[in-house]
Image: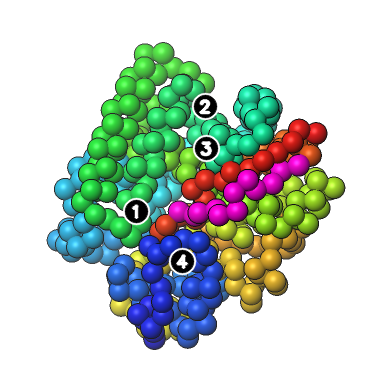
């Protein structure tokens, strides 16, 4: 049994933001799980330990069925999650943070649009959209890959699936980022107010969009969810929460892994050249991008009964932090784990989670990345860093560069 106080572990530090992997390696070297007092959570850093926790039938995302209303309220106050009426209704409760029958019922309503077959039908549309973006940037000798390109793809594509007009997608990104930031360690009152205000604005927007579709249905997910609500498969709050979650999930994490993926190719130019020479490796390259810098490196679970977890005994209700970012660099699971290898196979990474909460949008995210990187390598003979100092976002729950200045030359 060890504590993070025994280590230099500060996820809000610049050192952790720039390279969390030495800190993860120190956690993996500790025997058993490590208690992180600032989050009141036991951290699992090794691949086998993370897998054991997320695959256990006795682990849940929500405290709803293992704590009283009073205990949950106290937990919210202790974590500064209270007095957030809209955030509580639509963000703290969601498909992601539900379990059992509720989770299965909500996931079933949207799953059909995210299967490989359905997602692949979007290939031509995504390719045309990416081509149009690149056409507008091709004459620029230097761009910010994040802001000018990566940030403009995932949200627009998921927005089209849901039924959001293209013109509104930039605002959805702002709302999403301002809401999601509150899930990290820094939960100050200022960040709390930002999250609640943006949740409220997002709620009113989705409510208006829903009313439009009730009057004039279209072939989109909003209209499909309206039918599901009429059939009693979701209530009003679940409708808003699910739509909000899909839009938020379609933004930040894919933007982040696009950025870190491009950064990896630039740091390992031999791998970029290998990919240029053999673009049949693109699918494995995209998987390696998710492994090498997992965009969502931290999630949590609660244990529903007193039991042994990863060789230690824990009480019912204990909170565990599963560090996907660390598990995906575990050298016991991945040979040469700190090396970026576009042909890595097998590559059973855990960036999309495991079990019931396996990422719903993983096929769409991978298709976006496949198309973007294939297009850039085809259309630009030279891509290189324009600024060596690439700063990454601070926090335990996110991993991606704030900006990525690149220079390029058309083929």
The disc label shown at residue 15, or none? 4
Q: Quadrant of residue 321?
A: bottom left
Q: Distance between the residues labelled 2 and 1?
A: 26 Å
Q: How far apart are marks 3 and 1 (CA)?
A: 23 Å
Question: Which residue is at 49% across, 55% downward?
Answer: 392
Question: Which residue is at 35% across, 23% downward?
Answer: 210
Most common secondary structure along the magenta stretch: loop
Identify the residue position indicated by label 3 in the image: 147
Image x and y of residue 65, in percent: 28, 60
Query: Of circles 3 and 1, which is in front?
Result: 3
Query: Of helix, strand and loop, which one carries label 1?
Result: helix
Query: Of circles 2 and 3, which is in front?
Result: 3
Identify the residue position indicated by label 1 in the image: 183
Query: Of helix, strand and loop, which one carries label 4?
Result: helix
Image x and y of residue 234, in percent: 35, 36
Q: How far apart are marks 1 and 4 (CA)?
A: 20 Å
Question: Which residue is at 34% across, 28% downward?
Answer: 206
Query: Of circles 2 and 4, which is in front?
Result: 4
Identify the residue position indicated by label 2 in the image: 160
Viewer-side residue, 281 vs 186: 186
Q: Distance between the residues labelled 2 and 3?
A: 20 Å
Is the residue marked by circle 4 packed among few (<14), some (14-19), or many (20+) residues within 10 Å?
some
User: In the visual, does 227 lie left or right of 324?
Assistant: left
Question: Which residue is at 30% across, 69% downward?
Answer: 38
Q: Can residue 24 be seen in this view?
A: yes
Picture quarter with the N terminus? bottom left
Q: Looking at the image, is mark 4 or mark 3 earlier in the sequence?
A: 4
> Is the Cβ of the residue at disc 2 closer than 8 Å to that at disc 4?
no
């Amino acid at each position: 049994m060890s504590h993070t106080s025994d280590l230099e572990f500060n996820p809000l530090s610049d050192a952790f933001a720039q390279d969390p992997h030495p800190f993860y390696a120190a956690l993996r070297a500790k025997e058993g799980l490590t208690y992180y007092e600032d989050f009141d959570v036991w951290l699992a850093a090794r691949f086998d330990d993370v897998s054991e926790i997320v695959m256990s039938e006795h682990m849940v995302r929500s405290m709803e069925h293992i704590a009283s209303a009073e205990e949950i309220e106290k937990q919210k106050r202790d974590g500064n999650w209270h007095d957030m009426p809209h955030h509580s209704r639509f963000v703290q409760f969601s498909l992601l943070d539900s379990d059992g029958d509720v989770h299965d019922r909500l996931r079933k309503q949207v799953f059909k649009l995210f299967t490989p077959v359905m997602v692949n039908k979007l290939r031509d549309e995504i390719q045309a959209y990416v081509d149009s973006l690149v056409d507008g940037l091709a004459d620029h000798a230097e761009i910010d890959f994040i802001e000018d390109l990566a940030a403009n793809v995932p949200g627009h594509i998921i927005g089209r699936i849901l039924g959001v007009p293209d013109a509104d997608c930039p605002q959805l990104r702002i709302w999403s980022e301002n809401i999601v930031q509150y899930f990290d360690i820094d939960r100050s009152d200022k960040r709390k107010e930002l999250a609640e205000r943006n949740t409220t604005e997002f709620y009113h927007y989705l409510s208006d969009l829903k009313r439009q579709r009730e009057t004039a249905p279209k072939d989109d997910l909003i209209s499909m969810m309206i039918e599901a609500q009429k059939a009693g498969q979701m209530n009003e709050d679940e409708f808003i929460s699910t739509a909000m979650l899909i839009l938020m999930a379609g933004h930040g994490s894919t933007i982040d892994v696009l950025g870190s993926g491009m950064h990896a190719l630039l740091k390992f130019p031999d791998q970029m050249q290998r990919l240029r020479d053999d673009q049949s490796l693109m699918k494995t390259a995209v998987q390696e991008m998710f492994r090498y810098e997992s965009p969502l490196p931290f999630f949590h679970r609660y244990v529903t009964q007193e039991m042994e977890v990863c060789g230690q005994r824990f009480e019912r209700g204990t909170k565990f932090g599963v560090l996907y970012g660390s598990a995906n660099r575990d050298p016991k699971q991945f040979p040469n784990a700190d090396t970026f290898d576009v042909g890595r196979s097998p590559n059973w990474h855990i960036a999309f989670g495991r079990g019931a909460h396996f990422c719903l949008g993983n096929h769409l995210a991978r298709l976006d990345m496949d198309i973007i990187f294939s297009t850039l390598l085809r259309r630009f003979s030279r891509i290189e860093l324009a600024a060596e100092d690439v700063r990454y976002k601070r926090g335990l729950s996110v991993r991606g560069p704030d900006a990525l200045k690149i220079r390029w030359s058309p083929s």
